[in-house]
Amino acid sequence: MNLWKDRYGSFPPINAAQAKNLKTFTKNNGLEKTRDLLDAYFKTPDTWFVKKSYDLQTFLNNTTKIAEFLNTGKITSNAELRQIDNALGTMSTLDALRKGEI
């Protein structure tokens, strides 16, 4: 966990259950892939990851998002999510207008 230590200056607090979960994750995914995902995790500028101080549980719960960043170098930002939500709202409004519901 030198990645965490490099960022925060100490080793991360990991309890026995978290260590077991990481061991199982590594067994299922392989050491190299686990290292790649952890490296990508600490490079991902996701606000939730920053807020959670890149803790182990957040890593384990977000491996799909981390793998996406690892493979594409991109993340979906909150601004992009708001744009999608706004577009869906606009589409719903237009659909309701067409149907005479508004």
Image (cartoon, rainbow, N blue to C red):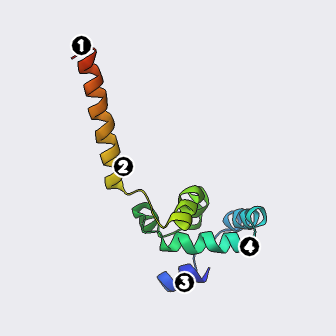
Q: Which residue is mark 2?
A: 81
Q: Indicate which label's residue lies in the foreground, 3 or 1.
A: 1
Q: Is residue 40 above or below residue 47?
A: below
Per the model, the C-alpha gap separating discs 4 and 3 is 19 Å
Answer with the quarter of the image where residue 25 lies: bottom right
Label drawn at residue 100: 1
Q: Residue at x 70, y 68 (%)?
A: 19
Secondary structure under the numbered disc 2 in the rendered image: helix
Visible in this render: residue 13? no
Whichever of labels 2 and 1 marks the residue nearer the N terminus, that label is: 2
Whichever of labels 2 and 3 marks the residue nearer the N terminus, that label is: 3
Whichever of labels 4 and 1 marks the residue nearer the N terminus, that label is: 4
Q: Is residue 53 above or below residue 79?
A: below
In this picture, residue 77 sits left or right of residue 27: left
Per the model, the C-alpha gap separating discs 2 and 3 is 32 Å
Q: Indicate which label's residue lies in the foreground, 4 or 1.
A: 1
Dot 3 and dot 1 residues touching (CB under 8 Å)? no
Secondary structure under the numbered disc 4 in the rendered image: helix
Per the model, the C-alpha gap separating discs 2 and 1 is 29 Å
Q: Which residue is mark 4?
A: 31
In this picture, residue 2 sits left or right of residue 74: right
Whichever of labels 4 and 3 marks the residue nearer the N terminus, that label is: 3
Visible in this render: residue 54? yes
Residue type highlighted by circle 4: Leu
Residue type highlighted by circle 3: Lys
On the image, the x and y values in percent for residue 55 come to: 54, 68
Dot 2 and dot 1 residues touching (CB under 8 Å)? no
Residue type highlighted by circle 1: Gly
Q: Residue furthest right?
A: 27
In this picture, residue 80 sits left or right of residue 32: left
